[in-house]
Image (tube, rainbow, N blue to C red):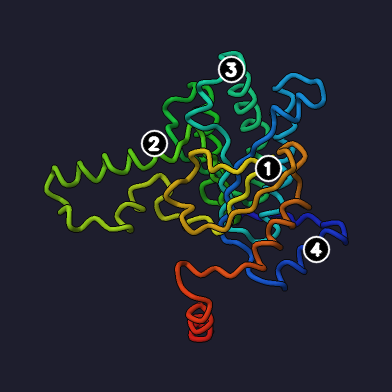
Amino acid sequence: MQTHRVKHLPIEDSKIQEQLKDSGRIPAHIAIIMDGNGRWAKNKGLPRISGHTEGVESVRDIVEACGQLGVKYLTLYAFSTENWKRPREEVSMLMRLLMRALRDETDKLHKKNVQVRAIGDIATLPREVQDELRDAIEKTKNNTGLNLLLALSYGGRWDITMAVRKIAGEIKNGNLNPDEITDEVISQNLSTQNIPDPDLLIRTSGELRISNFLLWQVAYSEIFISNVLWPDFRRKNLYDAISDYQKRERRFGMTSEQVSRSNIKSE
Protein backbone atom coordinates (compact mmCIF):
# COMPACT_ATOMS: atom_id res chain seq x y z
CA MET A 1 0.00 0.00 0.00
CA GLN A 2 1.31 3.43 -0.93
CA THR A 3 1.56 5.96 1.89
CA HIS A 4 1.64 9.73 1.57
CA ARG A 5 3.24 11.91 4.22
CA VAL A 6 1.21 14.89 5.35
CA LYS A 7 3.07 18.16 5.33
CA HIS A 8 2.45 20.30 8.38
CA LEU A 9 1.32 23.78 7.36
CA PRO A 10 2.26 27.04 9.08
CA ILE A 11 -0.41 27.80 11.67
CA GLU A 12 -1.70 30.88 9.84
CA ASP A 13 -1.97 29.08 6.49
CA SER A 14 -3.68 26.09 8.07
CA LYS A 15 -6.15 28.41 9.77
CA ILE A 16 -7.04 30.13 6.49
CA GLN A 17 -7.60 26.78 4.81
CA GLU A 18 -9.88 25.61 7.62
CA GLN A 19 -11.84 28.87 7.40
CA LEU A 20 -12.34 28.36 3.66
CA LYS A 21 -13.51 24.80 4.21
CA ASP A 22 -15.92 25.96 6.93
CA SER A 23 -17.14 29.04 5.04
CA GLY A 24 -18.60 27.33 2.02
CA ARG A 25 -18.10 24.95 -0.84
CA ILE A 26 -14.56 24.41 -2.12
CA PRO A 27 -14.59 24.38 -5.94
CA ALA A 28 -14.31 20.82 -7.20
CA HIS A 29 -12.59 22.01 -10.37
CA ILE A 30 -10.45 25.13 -10.72
CA ALA A 31 -9.06 26.18 -14.10
CA ILE A 32 -6.34 28.82 -14.38
CA ILE A 33 -5.13 30.96 -17.28
CA MET A 34 -1.58 31.62 -16.11
CA ASP A 35 -0.88 34.99 -17.70
CA GLY A 36 1.76 37.66 -17.17
CA ASN A 37 5.09 35.80 -17.24
CA GLY A 38 6.52 38.01 -19.99
CA ARG A 39 5.39 41.25 -18.39
CA TRP A 40 6.79 40.15 -15.03
CA ALA A 41 10.21 39.60 -16.60
CA LYS A 42 10.06 42.84 -18.59
CA ASN A 43 9.20 44.84 -15.46
CA LYS A 44 12.32 43.46 -13.82
CA GLY A 45 14.57 43.93 -16.85
CA LEU A 46 14.96 40.16 -17.26
CA PRO A 47 14.62 37.90 -20.32
CA ARG A 48 11.12 36.50 -20.89
CA ILE A 49 12.19 32.97 -19.96
CA SER A 50 12.90 34.21 -16.41
CA GLY A 51 9.21 34.94 -16.03
CA HIS A 52 8.30 31.44 -17.18
CA THR A 53 10.86 29.95 -14.82
CA GLU A 54 9.48 31.88 -11.84
CA GLY A 55 6.01 30.86 -12.97
CA VAL A 56 6.93 27.24 -12.22
CA GLU A 57 7.27 28.25 -8.56
CA SER A 58 3.70 29.56 -8.66
CA VAL A 59 2.52 26.29 -10.19
CA ARG A 60 4.23 24.35 -7.41
CA ASP A 61 2.59 26.42 -4.67
CA ILE A 62 -0.90 26.43 -6.22
CA VAL A 63 -0.86 22.69 -6.89
CA GLU A 64 0.14 22.03 -3.29
CA ALA A 65 -2.50 24.39 -1.88
CA CYS A 66 -5.26 22.88 -4.04
CA GLY A 67 -4.32 19.41 -2.87
CA GLN A 68 -4.47 20.52 0.76
CA LEU A 69 -7.86 22.19 0.28
CA GLY A 70 -9.40 19.09 -1.27
CA VAL A 71 -9.83 20.48 -4.78
CA LYS A 72 -10.45 17.49 -7.05
CA TYR A 73 -9.33 18.94 -10.40
CA LEU A 74 -6.91 21.71 -11.32
CA THR A 75 -6.49 22.56 -15.00
CA LEU A 76 -3.57 24.80 -15.94
CA TYR A 77 -3.36 26.51 -19.33
CA ALA A 78 0.32 25.78 -19.83
CA PHE A 79 0.75 26.15 -23.60
CA SER A 80 -1.93 27.14 -26.09
CA THR A 81 -2.28 26.34 -29.79
CA GLU A 82 -1.63 30.05 -30.40
CA ASN A 83 1.62 29.95 -28.43
CA TRP A 84 3.25 28.13 -31.34
CA LYS A 85 3.19 31.51 -33.14
CA ARG A 86 5.70 32.99 -30.68
CA PRO A 87 9.37 33.42 -31.69
CA ARG A 88 11.00 30.06 -32.31
CA GLU A 89 13.66 30.67 -29.67
CA GLU A 90 11.06 31.37 -26.98
CA VAL A 91 9.04 28.29 -27.93
CA SER A 92 12.19 26.14 -27.74
CA MET A 93 13.03 27.51 -24.30
CA LEU A 94 9.46 26.90 -23.13
CA MET A 95 9.62 23.29 -24.29
CA ARG A 96 12.93 22.77 -22.49
CA LEU A 97 11.50 24.34 -19.35
CA LEU A 98 8.42 22.12 -19.57
CA MET A 99 10.55 19.02 -20.03
CA ARG A 100 12.75 19.93 -17.06
CA ALA A 101 9.74 20.74 -14.86
CA LEU A 102 8.11 17.39 -15.64
CA ARG A 103 11.35 15.58 -14.91
CA ASP A 104 11.99 17.43 -11.64
CA GLU A 105 8.43 17.55 -10.30
CA THR A 106 6.94 14.14 -11.10
CA ASP A 107 8.37 12.35 -8.07
CA LYS A 108 7.26 15.19 -5.80
CA LEU A 109 3.76 15.15 -7.25
CA HIS A 110 3.63 11.39 -6.88
CA LYS A 111 4.54 11.62 -3.18
CA LYS A 112 1.72 14.13 -2.73
CA ASN A 113 -0.79 11.71 -4.29
CA VAL A 114 -1.32 13.98 -7.34
CA GLN A 115 -2.44 12.38 -10.60
CA VAL A 116 -0.97 14.08 -13.68
CA ARG A 117 -3.10 14.20 -16.82
CA ALA A 118 -2.90 16.17 -20.06
CA ILE A 119 -5.31 17.62 -22.60
CA GLY A 120 -4.48 19.08 -25.99
CA ASP A 121 -2.86 18.15 -29.28
CA ILE A 122 -0.05 16.31 -27.51
CA ALA A 123 1.32 14.82 -30.74
CA THR A 124 2.54 18.29 -31.79
CA LEU A 125 4.87 18.55 -28.78
CA PRO A 126 8.56 17.65 -29.18
CA ARG A 127 9.20 13.93 -28.73
CA GLU A 128 11.27 14.50 -25.58
CA VAL A 129 8.42 16.42 -23.96
CA GLN A 130 5.95 13.71 -24.94
CA ASP A 131 8.19 11.10 -23.32
CA GLU A 132 8.49 13.02 -20.04
CA LEU A 133 4.74 13.67 -20.04
CA ARG A 134 3.97 10.03 -20.68
CA ASP A 135 6.26 9.00 -17.81
CA ALA A 136 4.58 11.46 -15.43
CA ILE A 137 1.10 10.24 -16.40
CA GLU A 138 2.08 6.59 -16.06
CA LYS A 139 3.82 7.02 -12.71
CA THR A 140 0.93 8.92 -11.11
CA LYS A 141 -2.03 7.17 -12.78
CA ASN A 142 -3.15 5.35 -9.62
CA ASN A 143 -2.96 8.36 -7.31
CA THR A 144 -6.22 9.36 -5.69
CA GLY A 145 -5.67 12.99 -4.68
CA LEU A 146 -5.70 16.10 -6.84
CA ASN A 147 -6.07 15.57 -10.59
CA LEU A 148 -3.63 17.96 -12.27
CA LEU A 149 -4.61 18.56 -15.90
CA LEU A 150 -1.96 20.22 -18.03
CA ALA A 151 -3.44 21.94 -21.09
CA LEU A 152 -0.61 21.65 -23.63
CA SER A 153 -0.88 22.68 -27.27
CA TYR A 154 -4.49 23.18 -26.30
CA GLY A 155 -7.19 25.44 -27.71
CA GLY A 156 -10.91 25.48 -27.07
CA ARG A 157 -11.70 25.69 -30.77
CA TRP A 158 -9.36 22.77 -31.46
CA ASP A 159 -11.14 20.78 -28.74
CA ILE A 160 -14.59 21.44 -30.19
CA THR A 161 -13.39 20.77 -33.74
CA MET A 162 -12.00 17.38 -32.70
CA ALA A 163 -15.28 16.56 -30.96
CA VAL A 164 -17.27 17.45 -34.08
CA ARG A 165 -15.03 15.20 -36.18
CA LYS A 166 -15.54 12.27 -33.79
CA ILE A 167 -19.29 12.75 -33.78
CA ALA A 168 -19.37 13.07 -37.57
CA GLY A 169 -17.47 9.79 -37.78
CA GLU A 170 -20.03 8.09 -35.55
CA ILE A 171 -22.85 9.38 -37.77
CA LYS A 172 -21.03 8.27 -40.94
CA ASN A 173 -20.58 4.78 -39.50
CA GLY A 174 -24.24 4.55 -38.59
CA ASN A 175 -23.61 4.52 -34.83
CA LEU A 176 -25.32 7.84 -34.13
CA ASN A 177 -28.31 9.72 -35.48
CA PRO A 178 -27.98 13.52 -35.82
CA ASP A 179 -31.13 13.88 -33.70
CA GLU A 180 -29.30 12.10 -30.88
CA ILE A 181 -26.61 14.76 -30.56
CA THR A 182 -27.00 16.41 -27.14
CA ASP A 183 -24.88 18.55 -24.86
CA GLU A 184 -23.81 15.35 -23.12
CA VAL A 185 -22.74 13.73 -26.40
CA ILE A 186 -20.58 16.75 -27.22
CA SER A 187 -19.10 16.87 -23.72
CA GLN A 188 -18.18 13.20 -23.88
CA ASN A 189 -16.27 13.76 -27.12
CA LEU A 190 -14.16 16.63 -25.76
CA SER A 191 -10.67 16.10 -24.33
CA THR A 192 -12.17 16.65 -20.86
CA GLN A 193 -14.62 13.77 -21.10
CA ASN A 194 -15.68 12.42 -17.68
CA ILE A 195 -14.19 15.50 -16.01
CA PRO A 196 -16.63 17.98 -14.45
CA ASP A 197 -16.73 21.48 -15.91
CA PRO A 198 -14.71 24.08 -13.97
CA ASP A 199 -16.54 25.70 -11.08
CA LEU A 200 -14.03 28.53 -10.96
CA LEU A 201 -11.94 30.03 -13.76
CA ILE A 202 -9.06 32.24 -12.62
CA ARG A 203 -7.13 34.53 -14.95
CA THR A 204 -4.07 36.37 -13.74
CA SER A 205 -2.51 39.66 -14.97
CA GLY A 206 -5.81 41.54 -15.20
CA GLU A 207 -6.62 40.64 -18.80
CA LEU A 208 -10.34 40.23 -19.55
CA ARG A 209 -10.22 37.40 -22.07
CA ILE A 210 -10.83 33.65 -22.10
CA SER A 211 -8.12 33.26 -24.75
CA ASN A 212 -9.54 30.13 -26.39
CA PHE A 213 -9.44 28.15 -23.13
CA LEU A 214 -12.09 25.50 -22.39
CA LEU A 215 -14.68 27.38 -24.46
CA TRP A 216 -17.42 24.75 -24.05
CA GLN A 217 -16.56 23.82 -20.48
CA VAL A 218 -16.60 27.30 -18.87
CA ALA A 219 -20.15 28.13 -20.01
CA TYR A 220 -21.28 28.46 -16.37
CA SER A 221 -17.96 28.80 -14.55
CA GLU A 222 -17.52 31.63 -12.10
CA ILE A 223 -14.73 33.91 -13.36
CA PHE A 224 -12.19 35.61 -11.12
CA ILE A 225 -9.76 38.13 -12.62
CA SER A 226 -6.60 38.80 -10.61
CA ASN A 227 -4.36 41.77 -11.40
CA VAL A 228 -1.41 39.80 -10.03
CA LEU A 229 1.04 38.57 -12.67
CA TRP A 230 1.36 34.80 -12.66
CA PRO A 231 4.96 34.61 -11.29
CA ASP A 232 3.74 36.55 -8.22
CA PHE A 233 0.51 34.54 -7.84
CA ARG A 234 0.70 32.35 -4.75
CA ARG A 235 -1.68 30.53 -2.44
CA LYS A 236 -2.80 33.74 -0.73
CA ASN A 237 -4.14 34.93 -4.08
CA LEU A 238 -5.78 31.55 -4.63
CA TYR A 239 -7.51 31.86 -1.26
CA ASP A 240 -8.83 35.29 -2.28
CA ALA A 241 -10.30 33.80 -5.45
CA ILE A 242 -11.95 30.92 -3.59
CA SER A 243 -13.32 33.27 -0.93
CA ASP A 244 -14.85 35.42 -3.66
CA TYR A 245 -16.30 32.31 -5.32
CA GLN A 246 -17.96 31.24 -2.07
CA LYS A 247 -19.86 34.53 -1.88
CA ARG A 248 -21.48 34.06 -5.28
CA GLU A 249 -24.83 32.48 -6.04
CA ARG A 250 -24.54 30.00 -8.89
CA ARG A 251 -27.90 30.08 -10.68
CA PHE A 252 -27.21 28.20 -13.95
CA GLY A 253 -29.96 30.20 -15.66
CA MET A 254 -32.44 29.92 -12.78
CA THR A 255 -33.79 32.65 -10.53
CA SER A 256 -32.56 33.11 -6.96
CA GLU A 257 -35.88 31.74 -5.68
CA GLN A 258 -35.51 28.60 -7.78
CA VAL A 259 -31.96 28.08 -6.52
CA SER A 260 -33.13 28.45 -2.92
CA ARG A 261 -35.91 25.87 -3.40
CA SER A 262 -33.47 23.51 -5.16
CA ASN A 263 -30.99 23.82 -2.29
CA ILE A 264 -33.70 23.11 0.28
CA LYS A 265 -34.77 19.96 -1.58
CA SER A 266 -31.19 18.69 -1.78
CA GLU A 267 -30.55 19.13 1.95
Q: Residue at x 73, y 54 (%)?
A: 5
Q: CA distance from mark 4 to mark 2?
A: 39 Å
- Secondary structure, mark 3, is helix
Q: Earlier in the sequence, mark 4 or mark 1?
A: 4
Residue type of the residue flagged with mark 1:
Gly
Task: Look at the numbered discs 3 and 2 and tell me whether their residues touch, using CB distance below 8 Å.
Answer: no
Residue type of the residue flagged with mark 2:
Trp
Q: CA distance from mark 3 to mark 2?
A: 22 Å
Q: Residue at x 71, y 38 (%)?
A: 230
Q: Earlier in the sequence, mark 2 or mark 1?
A: 2
Q: In front of the other: label 2 or label 1?
A: 1
Task: Look at the numbered discs 2 and 1 and tell me whether their residues touch, using CB distance below 8 Å.
Answer: no
Nearest the viewer among 253 and 215 is: 253
Instruction: Point out the image quarter for the N terminus.
Output: bottom right
Q: Residue at x 55, y 29 (%)?
A: 132
Q: Which mark is residue 16?
A: 4
Q: CA distance from mark 3 to mark 4?
A: 39 Å
Residue type of the residue flagged with mark 4:
Ile
In the depicted structure, whether residue 189 falls above or below residue 152? below
- Secondary structure, mark 1, is loop
Q: Which residue is mark 3?
A: 92
Q: Which mark is residue 190?
A: none
Q: Earlier in the sequence, mark 3 or mark 1?
A: 3
Is residue 155 visible to us here? yes
Q: Which residue is mark 1?
A: 206
